[in-house]
Amino acid sequence: MTAILVINSGSSSFKYQLIDIDTETELAGGLVERIGEGTGHARHTNTASDAGRQERNLPIPDHTAGFDVMIAAFAEHGPQLTDANLIAVGHRVVQGGSIFTGPTVIDDAVQQQISDLADLAPLHNPAHVQAIVAARSNFPDVPHVAVFDTSFHLTMSPAAYTYAIDPALAAEHSIRRYGFHGTSHKFVSEAAAEFLGRPLSELKTIVLHLGNGASATAVDGGKSIDTSMGLTPLQGLVMGTRSGDIDPAVLFHLHRKAGLSIDDLDTLLNKKSGMLALTGNGDMRDVEDAAVAGDAVSQAALDVYYHRIKGYVGNYMAQLGGLDVIVFTAGVGENSGIIREGALRGLEGLGIEIDPARNDPFSRVARVVSTDASRVTVLVIPTNEELEIARETQAVI
């Protein structure tokens, strides 16, 4: 057995998976959360054990303490890290800017560069650095690899990533479209080609990563040519608490007329918008249930959600110069037949037809949900960002 430990860190939590890279199976996984709060929470699952999920509450003052909790969970509940032949630790990093074009072995200089990019991802990169420091301290004898959400999108052309503002100002402050969810878009687009038994190089694909955060990407021959998120993950589709695309003048108007500060506006668009603002609920499952039960407000919000997705599908069909495959993935995209049908309803004239009998049943496996007559194949493919991070980590070491 050869294992890679994958770390996905947030400001007050981190998820982890231990993956047998030879068989690409998950050996164990868990979550350490509420770091820095009075009482933290940790859960751990050994997938080979019948004991199920193990949970505990205890003080977790920082990420270093969190790693101690994780290591103790492995020691107590297995599998034993000493027996796992751990060859590397892979870290998800949201923002790599234009610097990191692929997975990168972390040394002190790389760690500092990730920290320096915090201006472009103030909610994410500082947390990644905390986890990297803790992990390098706990696992000093194996390489650590950063896998960047942004790297997959660096194949976009200047026409796709350039904002029409003063070029000198944009260059000085690194303002451009970067895109995110790159590990998911890469994994899913490659999995779609494998599922269909077709060369990745010949497929024109739109990936719809629909979760609490949501993004669309146009993938041509395995390369990202356009994506909905921009300088930050705020741009693009309607999300759980984020507005997605909005006229920038709305911000000026709210500042002048409503007296909202820059911080107020940041909070408004990132944490108090999207489905939460439109329905009072940021969880798509609850919004969907309410709409099915006849709630007009929830249905109107879903119509806004669908309208935005359809706009990107049409845009990316044009940018790709045709379309072979649409893939739904992530929590909402994988699990909601209602959302999939609503997002593509009315696009039959573009050769996109959903088959209700294939689309409705719940399933956790990759599958076709379009009709046999549909010119565009519509797939549902579960994403696996942790496995993609493990693969990229293995490739670079």
Image (cartoon, rainbow, N blue to C red):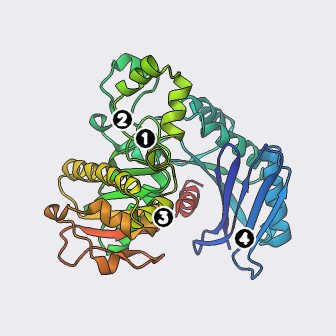
Q: Amino acid at mark 3?
A: Thr
- For residue 336, what is the image quadrant? bottom left
Q: Percent position (x, y) of residue 172? A: 45, 19
Q: Quadrant of the N terminus?
A: bottom right
Q: Amino acid at mark 4?
A: Thr
Q: Nearer the viewer, mark 2 or mark 3?
A: 2
On the rendered structure, is 68 left or right of 3? right
Looking at the image, tell me whether mark 4 or mark 3 is earlier in sequence order: 4
Q: Are marks 2 and 1 in contact (CB under 8 Å)?
A: yes
Q: How many angstroms separate mark 1 from mark 3 (CA)?
A: 24 Å
Disc 2: which residue: 246
Q: Are marks 2 and 3 in contact (CB under 8 Å)?
A: no
Looking at the image, tell me whether mark 2 or mark 3 is earlier in sequence order: 2
**What secondary structure is found at the residue carrying circle 2?**
loop
Disc 3: which residue: 383
Q: Percent position (x, y) of residue 251? A: 42, 25
Q: Amino acid at mark 2?
A: Ile
Q: Residues within 10 Å of mark 3 (few under 14, many from 20)?
A: many
Q: How many angstroms separate mark 4 from mark 3 (CA)?
A: 20 Å
Q: Is residue 207 visible?
A: yes
Q: Residues within 10 Å of mark 4 (few under 14, many from 20)?
A: many
Disc 4: which residue: 45
The answer to whether residue 39 is above or below residue 56 is above
Q: Residues within 10 Å of mark 1 (few under 14, many from 20)?
A: many
Q: How many angstroms separate mark 1 from mark 4 (CA)?
A: 35 Å
Looking at the image, tell me whether mark 4 or mark 2 is earlier in sequence order: 4
Q: Amino acid at mark 1?
A: Ser
**What secondary structure is found at the residue carrying circle 4?**
strand
